[in-house]
Every structure is written in C-alpha cells, then in structure tokens.
Amino acid sequence: MTKTLAFLVGILGLALLFHSTPVHAQAPPGPIPPAQPQPSSLDARPQGATKIVTAYTLPPELYKKTERLSKIRLGFIIIGTIYGLIVLWLILRLKLAPKYRDWGERASSNRFVQVLVFAPLLILTSDVLGLPEGIYAQTVLRNYGLSVQGWGSWGWDQAKGEFVNILLGIILVAILYAVIRKSPRRWWFYFWLVSLPIVVFLTFLRPLVIDPMFHKFEPLAQKDPGLTVALEEMLDRAGENIPPERMFLMGEAVKGTDLNAYVTGFGASKRMVIYDTTVAKMTTPEIVTVMGHETGHYVLNHIAKGLLISFAGLFIAFYLGFRLLGGLVARRGAAWGIRGVDDLASLPVLLLLLSVFSFLASPVSNTLSRYFEHQADQYSIEVTHGLTPEAAQVGAQAFQVLGETDLEYPDPDPLNVLLTYDHPPTRDRIRFFLTYDPWSSGRTGEFVH
C-alpha cells in the first residue's frame, strides 16, 4: 500500500490491527549481492530439526548482514518519516491542493463531485512524489533476497493499491469535509464517531476483498491435509472454532521468501492464513507452534483490544488535529491558498499533523503490540504443552528458522526495538520459549489450564 493510504486509512487505526508479521527491513541497503531465493516448493518441506536451539544465533556472515539491515531499517524509519513530511510540505508550498480544489469547483457546484476531482488528484500527487521511496525499499528487499518479485508484478501491486487508495480516499474525504462544514467546532468528535464503524467494516472486509487482490489463497485442507488435522487438534484444545474451510494457504513464494502466518477478520470473515513459504521451511510441529501463537490472538481478544486502543488513539489524534489545524490555517492559510478549515485544500495540513502524531505515537503502539505478541507466545507454549513433544524446543526451533529466513538481527539496540519492532526481538522470544516452564513446579499455564 502507498503512503497516502497509510495516511487516510492509518488514521482510522488500521495499523493497530493485529496482522502478525515478523519484522522485516523496510529500508535500502548498500551494494550487497542479491541472495539466492529461499526454497518455495512444498515438496522441499523439512522432516525434522537438524540441531538443538539454545539461543538465537547466526553464522558470522549472516550476522553481519542482519546487522547492516537493522541499522538501515532504523535510519529509513526516520528518513522515511521526514521524506513524507517533505512531500506534504511541497504540496502546500506549491499550492497544489488549492489548484485541485479549483478544478473541482469548476467541474461542478456539487460538493461530492468536487471531492471526486480533488481527492484522486491529491492522492496521486502524493504517491507519485513518494514513489522513489517505494522503489528504493523494494530494491533493498530484492538485494537482500527477501523479495523475488519482478518489477512488473510489483508495479501491478502498486496500481491495485492505488485503486483501493483512491476509493477509500474519496469516501473518507467526502465524509470528513461534510462533517467539518456541518459542525465546525465538533467535527473532530463526530468524525471520530463515524470512523468507528468504518474501521470495523474494513477489518471485516479486508480478508474477503482486499487481501485476495494481492495474493492467491487456497484451502489448506486441499494442499496439506496432515497439517490441517494437526491444527484442528490444537484448535480443539484451545476451544477455538476455526473450521478447515477457514484455513488458507497464501501464495507468497512468487513474491518473497519471508515466513509468516496470521489470523484476520471476525465473524464470517474470520480465518487463519499460512504462507506457502512457511509450510515449505517448517515442520508440522513448528507450524502448529506458530499457529498456536496466532490462535492466542483470538482467544485473548487481541483484535478486539487492538480496535479499542485504536479508537482511543483516533480520539486523541482527531482532537489534537482540531486544536492545531485552525491555528495553522489562520496563520499560513493565505500563503498556502487555503480559505479555511472547511476548504478541501486544508487536507494536506491535517495529514501533515496526523503523520507527525502517528510517528510520535509509534513507540507507544509498538510497545503495546510487543506486549500482545508476548502474550500470544506464552499462549502458544501453553496450548502446545503436552500436545507437541518437547514443545519448548520446537518453539525455539521455529523462531530460529523465522529469524534466519527473515534476516532479523540477533542484538538490536533498545532504540531500534522501540521505534521499529512491533514484535519482541527473536532472541527474547527464543529465550522465553526455553525458560517458561510453570509445569515443572506443579503449576499450570496462565491461559491454558
């Protein structure tokens, strides 16, 4: 997805929804020879672990590679944020938003038609200006072997993302400015109220409509019946009802080498998803451990809690946006060609404020996410204890494979963790799997008794 979609949809709290993805680099490396693609054939699936894991360690060369990537990712988070702010400042400085507003007003006196003209032009401008950053990031992933996606396929994904981007942008901008004109002093509160069902609806809709636009999903039971049976046993012990028809294998191998699994949606859209790369690289017990973690998100109500947290974050962000937007427009509006807060041309100012709020709030949101992910790790140990032989060691082996394949640095500094890690570092997760053992002292698990 593009930068503007992150602004327009991210402010609705979607970034806090729990889509369990290992931490990847999102920044450009120096000149590093491309790595060979990881195996993606299901026939190459391992039959057993080759070594006992006592800690997260990497060979010297791979260690150095992950260290470089970790430093680059941290720098890119900072530089990328600054670059995004510069893009919005350029849009304001060049008075592009007033120009697009004027084109909309010349096209029609109808407010919605004006948004139909204004919003796509502003979104396309922002995303075109941000395209070099996306190209640079994709180059990184290709150079590090984390992406095997061709540029044509990558461009097509960008085009599809842009379509979703513009569609959602039109809806949100139309609602936002209708509310601002209706209630200049309380628009922030009313837009917050309107945003709540939109967040819930998009959470429900995402696995049914948006995700299939970018990846192929196949019933897991058809591709790997044995794994499906093993997952059903784990789910039965967890008391969670996710039938086989809600378990899917996602085709990631044609685009990347990363390993992942996640839970998404609710109600009729609720499902478990496993990357085909994960099935290719992990044993069945290891995958059950990973999916035990994902099941923990559902059992421990992390998706619902994430929604509530995002709602609280939206409340604060919209209020601060209201408090600051009026002052900025009053002081700089004439220079930027903005008539007032209710002018469509004020949108870049609001987006600039919200992007600053989002960056400042990222340490808090990352900390909360790491806490929930740690709880899910604990749940995974408890739900697989007694179900999987040597469950703790299997879990450690699973995260060793994840760390090696996804190139996670074993020794991230605290600032890097604070700013970029929405999951605990792999070293800490493996350590926890190897040391958490309430059963040896006669106790039971906290979540699974």
Image (cartoon, grey):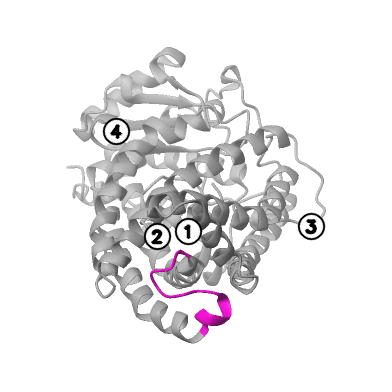
Q: Nearer the viewer, mark 4 or mark 3?
A: 4
Q: Residue at x 49, y 72 (%)?
A: 349
Task: Estimate the spatial distance between the alpha carbons at disc 4 and disc 3, rounded to whole Å.
Answer: 41 Å
Task: Estimate the spatial distance between the alpha carbons at disc 2 and disc 4, rounded to whole Å.
Answer: 23 Å
Residue placed under numbered mark 3 in the picture: 30
Residue placed under numbered mark 1 in the picture: 7
Asked whether 129 or 211 is in front, the reply is 129
The amino acid type found where label 4 is placed reads Lys
Q: Residue at x 63, y 48 (%)?
A: 407
The residue stretch that appears in magenta:
332-344
Asked whether 347 or 204 is in front, the reply is 347
Task: Establish if 212 lies above or below 359.
Answer: above
Task: Estimate the spatial distance between the alpha carbons at disc 3 and disc 2, rounded to whole Å.
Answer: 33 Å
Residue placed under numbered mark 2 in the picture: 11
Q: Contact (CB < 8 A) between labels 1 and 2?
A: yes
Count the labels in the image. Answer: 4
Residue placed under numbered mark 4 in the picture: 270
x and y percent of residue 267 in the render?
A: 23, 34
